[in-house]
Image (tube, helix red, strand yellow):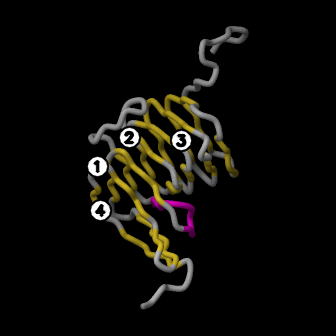
Amino acid sequence: GVVGVAYKDPATYFDVTLGQDGTTTLSTYYMTVDRLTIQGNAALDIKPTGGLLSNIDIELYDNGNLNVDGIVGAPDIIADGGVISGNGTVVLGAGLVPSLTQAIVIGNGAITPGPVGGVGTMTVLGNVGISQGGLLLVDAAGTSFDLLNIAGVMAMNGTVHFNPVSKPYWH
């Protein structure tokens, strides 16, 4: 932008990179960026009242973490060494209009519904692809377990890792 010039929507950003150690919290509907990169030990925590729209894509590298308890929208999300977690909704497509041709792609990263180490449900309006080296982390507590609710197709060539977070329930 230009110093001293007011913009119609000051909550619109451009190419945003979170690369410093620590967590950034978003609890406001809706923030819009053109592209979001989360890398290193940086994290973005989208609270249940928060929403993020990325016009191009979201990329997670080298332990970058995206926790979605609210809503996030992007054409694609790529996790190559990062983790996607949360109890929220991920909308893949232009704006917040779902498209079943768009995908979350997990390379050397992971996706886990709910909090890491806790049971929850994540909804994905789009496709999910987990390639070799990628992980689907599933927590189980008694008779409850994580649920990845996908409106599209899931392609799985990675590993499913089950984590008992409490004693199993046996009949």
Q: Do the residues labelled 1 and 3 touch (CB within 8 Å)?
A: no
Mark 1 neighbour density, 10 Å: few (under 14) some (14–19) many (20 or more): some
Q: Are marks 2 and 1 in contact (CB under 8 Å)?
A: yes
Residue type pointed to by label 1: Gly
Residue at x 54%, y 29% (from the top left corner): 32
Residue occupied by mark 4: 156
Q: Are marks 2 and 4 in contact (CB under 8 Å)?
A: no
Residue occupied by mark 2: 92
User: Marks 3 and 2, Cα distance to the nearest angstrom?
Assistant: 16 Å
In the rendered structure, which segment of residues is drawn in magenta?
110-118
Q: Which mark is residue 152?
A: 1
User: Marks 2 and 4, Cα distance to the nearest angstrom?
Assistant: 18 Å
Picture quarter containing residue 25? top right
Specify the quadrant that holds the C terminus.
bottom left
Give SS at disc 2.
Answer: strand
Residue type pointed to by label 3: Thr
Residue occupied by mark 3: 37
Picture quarter containing residue 126? top left
- Dot 2 or dot 4: first in sequence order is 2
Q: Residue furthest front?
A: 171
Give the label, 1 or 3, closer to the camera. Answer: 1
User: Marks 1 and 4, Cα distance to the nearest angstrom?
Assistant: 13 Å
User: Marks 1 and 3, Cα distance to the nearest angstrom?
Assistant: 24 Å
- Dot 4 or dot 3: first in sequence order is 3
Pick the front one: 146 or 52: 146
Pick the front one: 128 or 41: 128
| Magenta-span inclusion, residue 170 | no
Q: Are marks 1 and 4 in contact (CB under 8 Å)?
A: no
Give SS at disc 4.
Answer: strand
Mark 4 neighbour density, 10 Å: few (under 14) some (14–19) many (20 or more): some
